Image: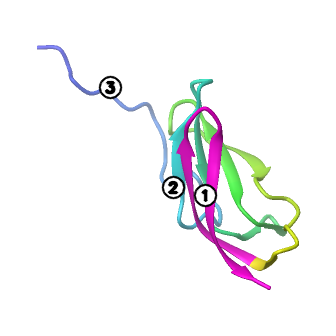
Amino acid sequence: MKELWAQPSDYTNPVVNRNFPDPTGIKGADGYYYVYGTNGRTNGNFLNIPVARSFDLASWKMLGNAIPVLPDWAIKDFWAPRVINTALHLLFRCRLLK
């Protein structure tokens, strides 16, 4: 009988081994998966919304900061982003206003 699920290759949890709370993810048109997380420090750098990318959901590459410069209306924190994959990637976020 043919397997219904792909067999996992070797990987070790956690697959994203850094400060990456409240992740949300989408599959991009380029075939990669993208995850976005709540703000925090990673390798000594503060990221408003960290972004990582994977082709196989086991090997992840950190891409950096989805919002490298805070908009004028923001105080400091972005929590639990939600990304919807449409013709454009829309990023909805929780925020504190000035």
Q: Residues within 10 Å of mark 2 (few under 14, many from 20)?
A: few
User: In the rendered structure, which segment of residues is drawn in magenta?
Assistant: 77-98
Which residue sits at x=38%, y=32%?
8
Q: Pointer 1: what residue?
A: 17
Q: Pointer 3: what residue?
A: 6
Q: What x and y, as percent, mark residue 6?
A: 32, 25
Residue 80, relative to residue 68: is it above or below?
below
Kindly state the secondary structure of the residue where label 1 is placed. Answer: loop
Q: Is residue 79 magenta?
A: yes
Q: Residues within 10 Å of mark 3 (few under 14, many from 20)?
A: few
Q: Amino acid at mark 2?
A: Pro
Q: Residues within 10 Å of mark 1 (few under 14, many from 20)?
A: few
- Between 96 and 78, the one lying in front of the other is 96
Q: What x and y, as percent, mark residue 57?
A: 50, 38
Residue at the far bottom in the pictured view: 98
Dots 1 and 2: beta carbons under 8 Å? yes
Dominant SS type (magenta): strand
Which residue sits at x=48%, y=41%?
11
Which residue sits at x=51%, y=31%?
56
Q: Pointer 2: what residue?
A: 14
Horizontal side of 77 relative to 13 (left or right) equals: right
